[in-house]
Amino acid sequence: MTQKSTMMTTANLDSTPEPPKTQRKTRRPRKKASPASKKLPSNPFMNEILELVTEQKTDAKKVAILQEYECDILKSLFIWNFDDSIISLLPEGKVPYKANENPLGTDHSSLRREQRNLYMFVKGGNDALSTIRRETIFIQMLEGLHPKEADIIVAVKDGDLEDMYDVPFEVVEEAYPDIEWGGRS
């Protein structure tokens, strides 16, 4: 009689299936909402528009944002900043004014409201104003604006808007082909 061996052979050990290893799945980080999908409130402040444009990586996206938030004051700011035929009647450099410290949206004027007064600060607008009166009106306007909008208008008067925000002339020109450059003064 032959006896069966109860010992397991190595062949039997190799054929036994190993329990499957559980692979730990890692989560992919969530993508942040792209700045292009960020929506501004109706009638946003100019600094909000310019900050959103600056966040965009491509000129095409910058143009799209400028077109979406197109308004007369934004065009006026770009014209005053980029058009060499506009002659500012305000002295260059820092303006001595007390910044409005109230929170955004409370007790502030806005550049949209002050647009009607911008003509006084360029040649051909209101040449009858004395220099002192013109500068006083400008300082009063700045003190009523939110500090970021006041900074924008100070930069624009000196033609330095590109130093604050990444909005080159070529992007503005493409976004607003209806603006006629030159021949204003």
Image (tube, grey):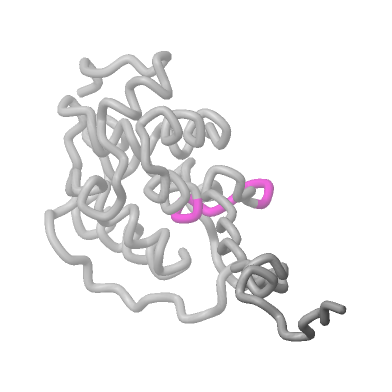
* Residue 43 part of the magenta-drawn span: yes
Residue 46 in sight from this viewpoint: yes
| Residue depicted at 83% across the width and 77% down the height | 2
| Residue depicted at 42% across the width and 21% down the height | 176
Q: Position of residue 99 (x, y in %)?
A: 38, 76
Image quadrant containing the C terminus: top left
| Residue depicted at 72% across the width and 70% down the height | 16
Q: Say above or below: 22 vs 81.
A: below
Q: Position of residue 132 (x, y in %)?
A: 21, 59
Residue 141 in sight from this viewpoint: no
Query: Which residue is most to the right?
Result: 1
Of residues 60 and 46, the one drawn nearer to the viewer in this rendering: 60
* Residue 184 part of the magenta-drawn span: no
Of residues 151 and 66, the one drawn nearer to the viewer in this rendering: 66
Q: Position of residue 60 (x, y in %)?
A: 41, 28
Query: Which residue is most to the left?
Result: 92
Which stretch appears magenta?
Answer: 41-48
Rendering quarter of residue 91: bottom left
Rendering quarter of residue 83: top left
Direction from residue 143 to residue 72 in the image, left or right: right
Of residues 150 and 130, the one drawn nearer to the viewer in this rendering: 150
Query: Which residue is most to the bottom?
Result: 7
Total labels: the figure holds 0
Image quadrant containing the N terminus: bottom right
Majority secondary structure of the magenta segment?
A: loop
Q: Say above or below: 125 vs 2.
A: above
Of residues 54 and 83, the one drawn nearer to the viewer in this rendering: 54
Direction from residue 153 to residue 183 in the image, left or right: left
Direction from residue 129 to residue 140 in the image, left or right: right
Direction from residue 22 to residue 155 in the image, left or right: left
